[in-house]
Amino acid sequence: MKKRKIELAVISDVHLGTYGCHAHELIAYLNSIQPKKLILNGDIIDIWQFKKRYFPAAHLKVLRKIIGMASKGTEVYYITGNHDEMLRKFSDTSMGNFKISNKLVLNLDGKKAWIFHGDVFDVSIQNAKWLAKLGGYGYDLLILINSFINWGLVRMGREKYSLSKKIKNSVKQAVKYINDFERTAADLAIENDYDYVICGHIHQPKKERYENKKGSCVYLNSGDWVENLTALEYSFKRWKVYHYNHDRLSPFFADEDLKEMDMNELIASITDKEVEIENVSEEYEGEKLESEKSLNDQRLSQD
């Protein structure tokens, strides 16, 4: 199966080494694309909560996949976040196509993109790191509990439920924090003449244009691979938020060595309904051709 060729992909907040990380889904996504540049925008490895007893093979495969992409020509930029802040001592290190930095500015078709994780706006991290770390452990525990709840819901034929999203949407202070984060990032980008500002950190995928008296910019957030399973993609001078759960082709890329499938087989694998629609369309075209042939024969006989 052919991979989607894109200019740039941005992922963040993977949190490898935690129970909430969806490593298998991320591998499937990375197998489905062929980007010229891959931006890892912080919190890829969760060093804060790293445990020797929990780092599954799938989490190692994610790292191997990223390194493999770099070895095959993709420019990989690892931007450090708060959960992998230990890597900041290696900032500006370059190993072939793999680069580590604290922030990044790219020129995209004549427009400037300012890319950083976003934890610099988090007061709790700057002034009370212990509190932020405690919150990280609590979040991981909440995700683990949520996974058991969702397992039960799926068994009962019901939709999955996100406890953390419910809490974030219910607590006014959390909503205010997210809104302030986005506005602050956008205002700073406008002040420094950036066309795009790209963050992670708050696990809220988004694309929105912000304006103030000095100008405007597009704020983008890549979301996370714990709850939302999202990424940012740039191609043909346009940005979009990619949602793994909305991509019906993703399961076909779970195996990197998957052979190319015939398009009809692929459609049939996705849904029988699409094949039925295609068959109806073919029958209609056939009937249309027969009808036109009959009319032509009648006209010739009349002449």
Image (cartoon, helix red, strand yellow):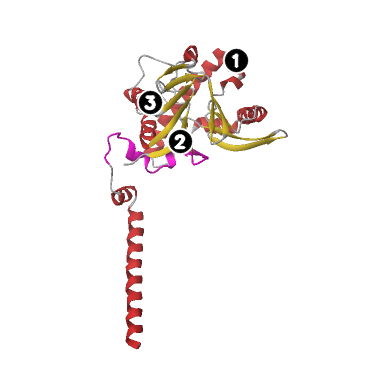
Identify residue type, mark 2. Glu
Location of residue 15 with respect to 127 vertically, above or below: below
Quadrant of the rendering where the N terminus is positioned: top left
Q: Which residue is mark 3?
A: 70
Kind of element beneath mark 1: helix
Q: Residue at x 33, y 84 (%)?
A: 300
Q: Quadrant of residue 208?
A: top right
Q: Which residues are magenta?
A: 235-259
**Residue 271 coordinates in the image, percent (x, y):** 34, 50
Image-based side of 229 in relation to 293, left or right: right
Marks 3 and 1: which is nearer the front? 3
- Pick whichever of labels 2 and 3 is earlier in the sequence: 2
| Magenta stretch contains residue 194 | no
Q: Which mark is residue 7?
A: 2
Kindly report the distance in space between the C-alpha atoms of the residues bearing marks 1 and 2: 34 Å
Is mark 1 in CB contact (under 8 Å) with mark 2?
no
In this view, 203 is above or below 242: above
Q: Mark 1 highlights which residue?
A: 126
Dot 2 lies on which element? Answer: strand
Disc on res. 237: none
Label 1 or label 2, whichever lies nearer to me, is 2
* Image x and y of residue 55, in percent: 36, 19
Q: Give the distance between the C-alpha atoms of the residues marked 2 and 3, in whole angstroms.
A: 14 Å
N-term-proximal mark, 3 vs 1? 3
249 falls in the magenta region? yes
Give the residue drawn at x 43%, y 37%. Answer: 6
Amino acid type, mark 3: Ala
* Image position, residue 151 (x, y; %): 38, 34
Determine whether, in the image, residue 224 is placed left or right of residue 188. left
Residue at 28% x, 48% y: name it: 262
